[in-house]
Image: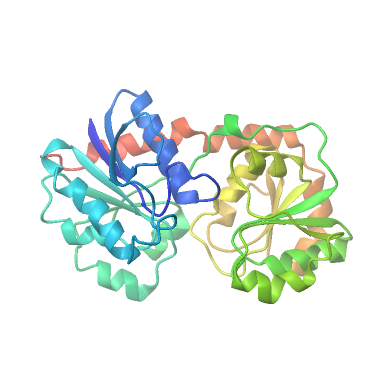
Amino acid sequence: MRIAVVGPVAQSIPPARSGSVESVTALLTSGLVARGHEVTLFATGSSTTTATLHATFPLGYHEDPDLWPWELCELMNLAAAVERSADFDVIHYQAEYAPISLAFTRMSSAPVLVTVHHAPTPTEVDLWSRYPEAPFVAISAAQAQLLAGLNVVGTIHHAVDTKAFPAVSQPEDYLLFLGRFTEGKGVLAAIEVARRVGLKLVLAAAENEYYERAVSPLVDGDMVVYAGEVGGAEKASLLSRARALLYPVQASEPFGLVMVEAIACGTPVAALRRGAVAEILEEGITGGVFDSLDDLVEGLPSVLSLDRGRVRDRAVERFGADCMVRKHVEVYSRLPIT
């Protein structure tokens, strides 16, 4: 098939550090090429890919302050693919913020499939329903429920390159929080859990206003340690050496890629039951899913005792790249190709 994959243009694909949408887009693109498809990736010129690269901008708007507003940058990148729609059998838009591809649904000669990477509100979905024929891929059953009434043509979990997340036989004595510093991500709850169980907690994410205001005063450099933003091999090493990843999210999320990255290392996850958490974690196999912070604290010892080899094996089986790529090809083949 002739496939256009339109990634975000905030930064390079794959990202130099953090960026789940860019990471998944890179993995999907390389997997499609490996299967013999003719793939064009619409991304920044700083991107690295085995596909044909269409560089709309040399750098992303997170890297070049002259590229603003960001909405116009994303729109121009998407439009570049639609302008060449006759060259493709399908255009797959990875929407980091909003499915602006909907406006091109009836203008493109190739079907424009969209993946959104957030949990949409009812108001958003109501607006999107003005294009009831536009095909969506949900990234979880939890997100698919939020997309009710739209044309959801498939539900496909994200994947990771499991070879990039090595396991270690003996972890070090710390828990890990890895994610953006926001109230919804639950970093304060993670600190509370670690203190209640008497274990060191390492925090890894980019500094922001919330970190400076709410988190930094709790970092003592001993039991609560800030490691900064990590990516690539540094992130994999931090994940693999942790006794467990804490994921006490306060707001529902449509996926949670860091959980998959953790279990790919053999590191179990202790999480609160929100959004797609119960889809990703298998209770008593790859982690624990709890209804309250008290339950998480009480159940953490059982999570720490899980067989790390089995944790990794299940991650490879359920979240390897081949499975994700195959399911996308199946969805592409069902679209009305002109």
Expressed as whole percent of the image width and height from the top left, the position of residue 312 reads: 66, 35
Q: Nearer the viewer, residue 330 or 58?
A: 58
The C terminus is located in which quarter?
top left
The N terminus is located in which quarter?
top left
Left/right of residue 151 with respect to residue 138 in the rendered view: left
Q: Nearer the viewer, residue 260 or 177?
A: 177
Q: Residue at position x 44%, y 57% from top?
A: 62
Count every numbered label the image shows and give the total. Answer: 0
Expressed as whole percent of the image width and height from the top left, the position of residue 134 reads: 22, 56
Q: Residue at position x 54%, y 66% from top?
A: 252
Left/right of residue 332 with respect to residue 163 in the rendered view: left
Expressed as whole percent of the image width and height from the top left, the position of residue 105 reads: 16, 56
Expressed as whole percent of the image width and height from the top left, the position of residue 107 reads: 10, 54
Q: Quadrant of residue 194?
A: bottom right
Left/right of residue 131 with respect to residue 278 in the rendered view: left
Residue 148 visible (yes or no) = no
Residue reaching furthest to the right: 198
Can you say whether 34 is above or below 58 in the image? above
Residue reaching furthest to the front: 66
Q: Residue at position x 69%, y 44% from top?
A: 239
Can you say whether 90 is above or below 108 in the image? above
Q: Quadrant of residue 306?
A: top right
